Image (cartoon, helix red, strand yellow):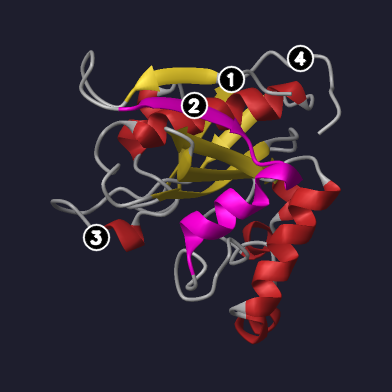
Amino acid sequence: MASRRSARSGGKGSGPAIAVVPATASRWADLETMFGPRGACGGCWCMAWRLRRAAYDRGKGARNKARLKALLRAGPPPGVLAFADGQAVGWCAIAPREAYPVLARSRVLSPVDDRPVWSVSCFFVARGFRRQGLARRLLEGAVSLAAAHGARLVEGYPVEPKSGAIPDVFAWTGLPGTFLAAGFREVARRSATRPIMRRGVRPAQKTQA
């Protein structure tokens, strides 16, 4: 089990305590409520990188929702959730790179080498909790989850805007600053806007989901 992390959303006493925990089957209802009827965005339910395009498009909505629920049931947890006062307010997806077929087909994000890595594929932060550093806490929790299941390397694929800020909906793989703040470093860049960033981790003893 990844370690539980708690912090304040702002300065001392300025907001609710935040706890980041593995997304286990017992927390499905919390994730479902946070994602809402649109499944976070357009019926995705965090399946965009786990399915081939045709299957993903056919599954938008109920099918993709069922797939994510099945992942939570099967374990290991496919990500972490952030809670504020008992309410889920954030999500970060992470899994061994081979769980994401889209990465296998990407020229820009193709493997840097043959070392096994866990990949951070998605962030979702509820409105009202954005731009408060929650993405970094989610990322650190995701790294802890990967380490608890034997990972030695964690990899991310943030978007670096060409100029200025970008809408939140286009930054779902994260921003470079979030990864840098969590101890990642850039190891490759095949596109001006898509660095590949890595962090080494010390694997903990494998645990049950």
Q: What stretch is highlighted in magenta?
A: 16-36
Q: Mark 2 points at which residue?
A: 19
Q: Mark 4 points at which residue?
A: 204
Q: In which quarter of the image is the C terminus?
A: top right
Residue 192: give x, y in percent of width and height: 32, 52
Q: Name the residue under label 1.
A: 4
Q: Which of marks 3 and 1 is nearer the N terminus?
A: 1
Local crowd at mark 3 within 10 Å, few (<14), some, or many (≥20)? few
Q: How far apart are marks 3 and 1 (CA)?
A: 30 Å
Tag in front: 4 or 1: 1
Residue 159: give x, y in percent of width and height: 36, 50
Q: How far apart are marks 1 and 2 (CA)?
A: 7 Å
Relative to 92, say whether 55 is above or below: below
Q: In the rendered image, is residue 187 in sight?
A: no
Residue 206: give x, y in percent of width and height: 84, 22
Label 1 amino acid? Arg
Q: Earlier in the sequence, mark 4 or mark 2?
A: 2
Label 4 amino acid? Ala
Q: Are marks 1 and 2 in contact (CB under 8 Å)?
A: yes
Label 2 amino acid? Ala
Name the secondary structure under disc 2.
Answer: strand
Q: Earlier in the sequence, mark 4 or mark 3?
A: 3
Relative to 118, say whether 150 is above or below: above
Farthest front residue?
86
Q: Which of marks 1 and 2 is nearer the N terminus?
A: 1
Q: How far apart are marks 4 and 3 (CA)?
A: 36 Å
Q: In the rendered image, is residue 158 in sight?
A: yes
Determine whether, in the image, residue 147 is placed left or right of residue 21: right
